[in-house]
Image (cartoon, helix red, strand yellow):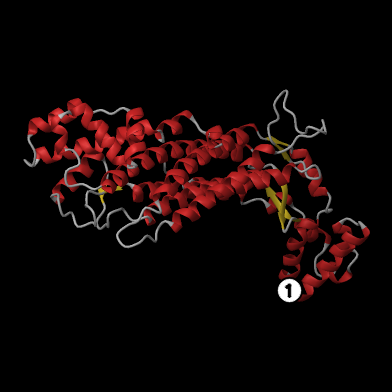
Amino acid sequence: MIERYASAEMTRIWSDENRFRIWQEVETTVCEVRAELGQIPTEAAAEIRAAAGFDTARVLEIEKTVQHDVIAFLTSMAEHIGPAARYVHQGMTSSDLLDTAFALQIREAGQVLRRALVSLLEAVEKKAQEHRDTVMMGRSHGIHAEPTTFGLKLLVYWSALERGLRRLDAAQEQIAYGQLSGAVGTIAHLDPRVEEMTMAGLGLKVEPASTQIIQRDRHAAWLGAVALVGATIEQMAVEIRNLQRTDVHEVEEPFGKGQKGSSAMPHKKNPIVSEKLTGMARLLRGYAHTALENVALWHERDISHSSVERIIFPDGCHLLHHMLTRMTWLIEGLVVYPDQMRANMAKVRQMYFSQAVLLALTEAGVSREDAYAWVQAAAMKVWDEGKPFKEALAEDRRITAQVDGRALDRCFDLEHQLRHVPAIFARTLALKDWN
C-alpha cells in the first residue's frame, strides 16, 4: 500500500537497481584504493572499474538459491568482470558493504526530504506573513483565551519545522558513516588506510569503532528526526481539522471542483488531507520506535534489525515525503475566513480582556487575589446573564473605584494587546540561515 504515496524520486532511491548500483560503487572504490596502496594489481582495479556491472533480475534469481543477497550480487558482478573479480570483496564482510551503502542510500533519501521540508517552510512562512495581522481567538483547553493572529499561529509551526530541519541536518551528518572493519570490527584482513581512503572517496566518514555493523543508534536518531517532522505536520493537521469544524469554520482545506465529501451527505466538505496526515504521523512514530528496538543486538551482531530496516526506512521516507508535499499543497491553498474569526471572538463579549483588567487593578494597588475575584465575578455575569464584559465590570463599584472609565477603555485595546507580534515575527524569522 505504501507505493500509493511514493514519489518517483524516492522510489528510484529505494529500488533494487539503485541499491545494487551503490553496492557496485563501494566494491569498485575499495579495489581502486587497494590498487593505489599497491595491495592489488593496478590493471585489475582498472579492469574492475571498466567491466563492473550487474543484472538486477539475475541477482534476485541467484538469491532465491543462495538465500544471501550480497553473495548473489557478487556472483552477478563477477559474471560481468571475469577473472579480476577475485579481488572484489577481499577482506570484507557483508555488513561492510551493506552498512556503508545503506548510509549512502539514507543520505540520498534525506536530501530529497530536506528539499521537500524547505518547500513547506517557505509555504508556511509566506502564509504566516500574509496573515500576520489577521486577528483570531487564541484557545487553551479548547476554550477562548486571549486574541492572537493566524499568522502567529503559523509562525509557531514554522519555528517547529525549522527545528525539524536542523534535526534532519544533524541526523544526516550522524548517518554519513561507513566501515570496512570486518567480521567483528577488528579490521583483521584489511589495512585501516583502505577504510579511510574508501570512505573519503565515497564522501563518508569512518565509523571510529564498530562491531560487524555500524551501531544502530545512528539509524534510530535519523528515523527519530523523520518522525519529529511528521509530528509537527500532525500538529498542523490537527489544528486545521479543529478550525474547519462547522461550529468554528475559520479555515478550510482546498476543495476541488468535482470533489466529494461524503457518499451519503452531499453537503459535506471534510478535512480529509489533514486526517490522512494525522494517521501517517502515527506510522512514522511506530517506525522510530522500531528503530530504537534495533539498537540492542546480540554480541557483535545478529540480523534481527536487518529485515525490519528493509521496511521502516523506505516506507518512512515515502511517507514523510508524501506528508511534506501534501501539507505544502494544503497550506498554499488553505482558505482563511477572517470575518468568521472575528465573529467567533465576539461570542465571549470581550472577556478576553480579563487579564488586562486584572493587571490594571493590581497596578492601582489592589491585591492580586482581590483583583482576580472581582474580575472573575464580572466574567461570570457574562457567562450566566449574557452581559457585555465591560458593562459587567462597570457595575462593580469595587472595580470602578480603582479603575476609571478611561483606564478601563485602555484595557480593551486590541492593538495594544497584539503590539509585539511583529517583533515575534522578526526574531523568529531571523533564525533562517539555511538554503
Give the x, y percent position of residue 2: 54, 37
Q: Residue at x 35, y 48 (%)?
A: 175
Seen from the viewer's position, the closer of residues 100 and 88 is 88
Give the x, y percent position of residue 84: 13, 32
Q: Residue at x 56, y 32 (%)?
A: 4
Q: Quadrant of residue 410?
A: bottom right
Rendered-image quadrant of the N terminus: top right
Q: Quadrant of residue 140?
A: bottom right
Compared across the picture, whether 138 is left or right of 52 comes to: right
Secondary structure, mark 1, is: helix
Give the x, y percent position of residue 389: 85, 58
**In the rendered image of this protein, does residue 70 appear above or below residue 138?**
above
Q: Amino acid at mark 1?
A: Arg
Q: Residue at x 40, y 46 (%)?
A: 169
Seen from the viewer's position, the closer of residues 338 and 60 is 60
**In the rendered image of this protein, does residue 299 appear above or below residue 205?**
below
Does the image show residue 326?
Answer: yes
Count residues near mark 1 (Cα–Cα under 10 Å), then give few for <14, some for 14-19, many for 20+: some
Q: Total of numbered circles in the picture?
A: 1
**In the rendered image of this protein, does residue 325 appear above or below residue 388?**
above
Compared across the picture, whether 180 is left or right of 321 comes to: left
Seen from the viewer's position, the closer of residues 402 and 37 is 37
Does the image show residue 126?
Answer: no
Seen from this angle, which residue lies furthest top? 258
Residue at label 1? 368
Q: Quadrant of residue 405?
A: bottom right
Give the x, y percent position of residue 22: 30, 35
Seen from this angle, which residue lies furthest right? 385
Rendered-image quadrant of the C terminus: top left
Q: Residue at x 22, y 38 (%)?
A: 27
